Amino acid sequence: MPMTLSADDIAAAVDRLAEAIRTKTANAPIALVGIRRRGDEVAERVLTRLAEDDRELNFGMLDISLYRDDFEHLHENPKLLESDIPFPIEGAHVILVDDVLFTGRTIRAALDALADYGRPAKVELAVLVDRGHRELPIQPDYTGITLSTQRNENVLVCLEKADGLDQIRVIANESP
């Protein structure tokens, strides 16, 4: 069954992420690293909400295109985007941020990519949407929205900066 979540739903989810991170990390220094493309926008929004805290906050963006294990399933060549991590990863408390957590394969790729920058003291995961159906033992530490989906459905996240509007749609997958 098609479902649509609004800009208000997304804003409330970002607020939940920020509040959970604030509570769990108790003003300790953290580094938010958004997975490109859309995880970085979610991370920026969380960062904006945490900016009022008296703590050290770092922000970076991570492109995982070359670390994916599903090149043969992609319908087009991956578009390489720039990673930008302007702070030392070594010893940092990193919170990876993504828009949708599904099988866990994107996060596995992100962990591999992050390791090329150094060895963090701790890595946690924040996701705007957790839709279930894991194939790898990866779970979020922070979740904005939990959706019960069917495996054959797609969760499409549109965000203002990338897409011109804020909306989440759950639709049936049209491929066999």
Image: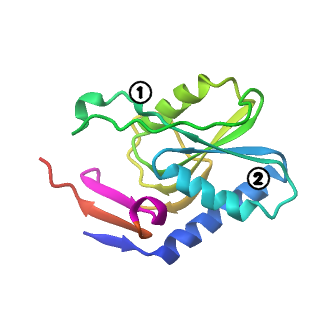
User: Within the magenta stretch, is there residue 35?
Assistant: no
**Quadrant of the image containing the N terminus:** bottom left
Along the horizontal axis of the image, is 118 left or right of 61? right
Look at the numbered disc 2 and give the secondary structure of its residue.
helix
**Where are the magenta residues, as a range?**
148-163
Label 2 sits on residue? 24
Depth check: 82 or 26 in front? 82
Residue 66: assigned label = 1
Q: Position of residue 45 (x, y in %)?
A: 61, 61
The label nearer to you, 1 versus 2, is 1
Tell me what residue is drawn at x 34 percent, y 66 percent: 169
- The residue drawn where x is 48% and y is 74% is 7
Do the residues under discs 1 and 2 have CB atoms within 8 angstroms?
A: no
Which numbered marker is on residue 165?
none
**Is any part of residue 149 visible from this angle?**
no
**CA gap, disc 1 and disc 2:** 32 Å
Q: Within the image, what quadrant is residue 50 found in?
A: bottom right
Q: Which residue lies furthest to the right in this view?
A: 54
In the image, residue 129 sits, relative to residue 122, either above or below, namely: below
Task: Return the residue nearer the eye: 52 or 121.
Answer: 52
Q: Residue at x 35, y 58 (%)?
A: 155
- Residue found at x 39% / y 62%: 163
Q: In this view, does 14 lie above or below 137?
A: below
Q: Where is residue 14 in the image (x, y as percent from the top left)?
A: 59, 64
